[in-house]
Structure formats: C-alpha cells, structure tokens
Image: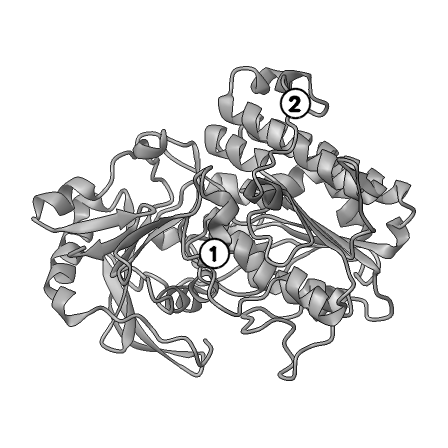
Amino acid sequence: MTAEDEPTWLAPERSDAAETALSVLTQADLEPVVDMVLLARDGAYEARTHHGAVRFSRADNTYTELTVEGQHPLSDQSSDKFSSLADEQTNVHPERHDNAYPNAYDQIAQLFDHPSAPDLCVIHSAAHNWEDQGGHRGEHGSLGIVQARAPFVLAGPGIRSAGVIPRSARLVDVAPTVLELLGVTPLANGDHLANQDGVVRHDVLDSSTKPKHVVMFLFDGTNPMVLYDMAARGEAPNVARLIEMGTAYGHGAFAGLPTVTLANHTSILTGQLPGHHGILHNAWFDRQKNEQIITNSNANWPWAMQHVHAGVESIHSAVHRNEPGAFTASINEPCDIDADFSTFGFLRAGEMPPLPENPAELPHTTERFVRPSKDYSWSSTIDHMGVEQAVGVLSGHYRDVSYPLPRFMFANFTLTDAAMHEGGPYSEIAAAAIRDSDARMGEIIKAVERAKIFDETAFVLVADHGMEETNPAVRGDWAAPLRDAGLNLRDEGYGFLYLNA
C-alpha cells in the first residue's frame, strides 16, 4: 500500500443494503456457487461465508486478525497445495475447507484500495460453471489457488539453471525481476517502478552476467501444472527447452484479485496489483462518473490503458527512463504503456495489421479444433499475426518499416485461454492449444537465433492467471435471490456488487 492508496470503505448509507445482501449470499442454498463474500467497512476487511467469517485489519502492510466466527474461511493460505498435476486432478473443484488462498489478506486489501472498488466482492466457488458465459468447462477469477496460480519460467543469461524448483512467486514480481535482469538502475527507494508491489526474485538470478535483451511470452489463462507436465513429457519442447536452460517456479506465480485477464496483464507489466494500477477488472463501475467501465470488448481493448492511474509505469517506461534510446516492442498486448512498437498502436491509428484468410491453413494449427471452434479459430489467427510481427521486428523489418533489435519484447498468446475455457484445463483441446502456442513461441525463439543474439537474450514465460476445471452441474448464480430480496444493485464483471447504484 502506498501513501496515495486509501481503502474504499463501505459507505454508511449502503450499510443496510450490504447486510441484506450478505444474508442472502451466505445462505446454504447458494453455497454451491458462492465461495465467500469480501467487503471493507469500519476500518477492517471481512471474508464471510455460510460457515464462518474472519475480520482483519492492515497497518504498515502488516495484517492482524481481529475476530474469527465459526470456520475460518482463509485459514489455509499456503502456496504449495495441489502443486502437481496428479494432486490437482485428484482434488478437482475443491470445496472451501479443502482449498487454499495464497496471499489472501493482501489480495483482499489491495482490491479495496481502488477508488471504484465494489461494495461487496462475491468469490465464486471452484466448481461454479458460469451459465451466463456459455458454461465454460475451465474458469478463473477467484481467490482459490488453482485459479490464481500461473506458470513462471525464466531462462538465459542472468538466470540460474535450476530446473523446476519447489517455490512460488507473485505476478507482480515479474516486472521488477525483468528490470533487474536488464540492468535498469533502481529508483531512489530501491524499487524499479513507481509504486511497485512486487520484488526482485534474486533467488533465480545469476548476478555474474546480464542479458542485452529480454523476450517475454505470455500464454493467457494457462494452468501451470498442465504446462509443466506437457513440457516434461516432450509435448511442449520449447517450454521444456527454457526450463532446462533456466528455472521454473514449481508452485507457480500468483495473480492479483480478481484473477482475470487485463487486470493481471497490467500487473505483470507494471509490478502493481489491480487495486493499485487502476485496471480493476474486465468491467467495473465508476460511481463518481456514474459510468460502467468495460475494457475487454473488441472495441475497447486498444484504449484500455486510459484507465490506469496517473504515474503508473510499465517495463517499457522503466527501460526508456534508464536508456532513452532503447527500443521496446509490445506484441498483441493491451498493456502497451510507453512501448515503441505496439500491435494495439496500429489499431488505435486505424490500421489493422494483415490477417490470414483461412485459419485452418496456418502453420502450427490443430485442424481438429480450428475448424469447428470459432474461438480456437480466431485466437489462432490473432496469435499467428503476433508471430509475424515479432519475427518481423526481430529480423529488422515489418510492413516495410525498419526496426532496431528490441531491448525488451513482450508477446501475448491468446489461444491457451480460449481452449482451456472451452474444454477445461485437462482436455484435448487445451493440450492442442499448448502444443500450437509452444510451436509459435518456437518461431520467435528461432528469430532470436537468426538475429544472432540468442546467447545475449533472456526469456521469460508467464500466464496472467490459472484455469480450473468446473462442474457442469453447478450452474446458476446469485442474481435472482438478490433481486427477490428487493435489492437495487449492479453486478459488474460477475461478482463486483455496487449497491444502490
């Protein structure tokens, strides 16, 4: 928490409505879909469930439990639970008493630091299959460990070669660690970014050498246990190559709440949690402007960064602050703050980069899924376009424009998220998406080799959140019971409740 952050406490005029909503949401008949409800009021934070509650306070980033009623909903905050694919699959969609909630107190508190934080945040259960979103077999967004856990792999100069290690990190650690790798001079307070929440992960760094370039990949929505298992079995050879060269966090890197796409893309690139950098969710409500904010529609993606708070820096910003002449590139990534080359910069300028006409004919595309699945087809097309851009920039030319070699390049792949939503993380379509994405990543690595900078380049692979198998029988949500209770509210992003709005 920085000096600028002030918790968004529940307004007194909404207290009665909040109590009514809490009584509805913590009823036994909603427990299959409601894991817990979070709120901030009267100088403290609360997590409430049908079986119990905890109330805690924060002072100087230290948390103190004030009261516990019944079963403590956040008693297990371990980061090593379900830390193998076999263990995860044995405990599919765990109930609250079997689940873990890493960094839960910090996760909850940072959410309510945002000026547009909801009055109540409903955390869906691990089993919940969102009918309104098409009944996804894979889901994310909650505090639970499987949905929050992302892969984190580093390799190349400046990285220790340790393989898979039994440790965890946080996604906000990625940016300061990358900047330390690049030799960016810290600010006066020792941080690499303004108001960063993350830390440099010195445990995986080798200070005896520094890379001249860093290329980072993001496999959106990828379950790390599935990814690491496929790499170990030879089905993701480029991921396996990076792990063999460097270090992978076996217990993953944990996303910020809510564990959704744009909030955590922005966290990865800025080192700040969602409640601090400004991108609170894929959708939220601004009471001051009386305006719904939607960032994840096709129309809004290119301009999403207008909602970041003033003064937020990205990796691109810090590289330029340290080396004004450095060149950085952002491939297919909405969080492109201060990047020199940006896919979304083309879109903001009204220039759509060329897209292939027939996705089924693209290289590294699984025909079995690209033909029947609209989402698989579209993501394959977009990711292929990203590879063309990355390879072009690394070759020195893209669309008749010359580019220098990037000091930092970020490349986002979307297919894994689409496939894991559609089939669940353990499905054949999910495995195909990892194989396709691994091969596309391999094309970019080959371009690094052709540019003769492989030995001077560090590689980083992350995801923005995890993906958890849902239960198709656990449908429905809390909208009807809240409506029947006579409550006037907005439910943004599914779970951000704004009362009397």
For label 1, the SS is helix
Q: Position of residue 43 (x, y in %)?
A: 27, 78
Residue 356 is marked as 2
Q: Residues within 10 Å of mark 1 (few under 14, many from 20)?
A: few
Query: In this rendering, would 25 be left or right of 463?
Result: left
Q: Where is residue 452 shown, x and y percent of the image?
A: 92, 47
Crowd class of label 2 (few under 14; some 14 to 19; many from 20; radius 10 Å): few
- Please identify, in this view, whether the residue under mark 2 or under mark 1 is nearer the observer: 1
Residue 376 coordinates in the image, percent (x, y) = 55, 26
Give percent across and percent down for residue 14: 15, 64
Q: Residue at x 66, y 79 (%)?
A: 187
- Quadrant location of the N terminus? bottom left
Answer with mark 2 or mark 1, whichever residue precedes in sequence.
Answer: 1
Residue at image point 38% right, 64% down = 111
Distance, label 2 to label 1, CA atoms, is: 30 Å
Q: Quadrant of residue 276?
A: bottom left
The coloring applied to the image is one colour
**Residue at mark 1:** 306
Rendered residue at 16%/55% (across/down): 21
Question: SS at mark 2?
Answer: loop
Name the foreground residue: 193 vs 156: 193
Q: Amino acid at mark 2?
A: Pro
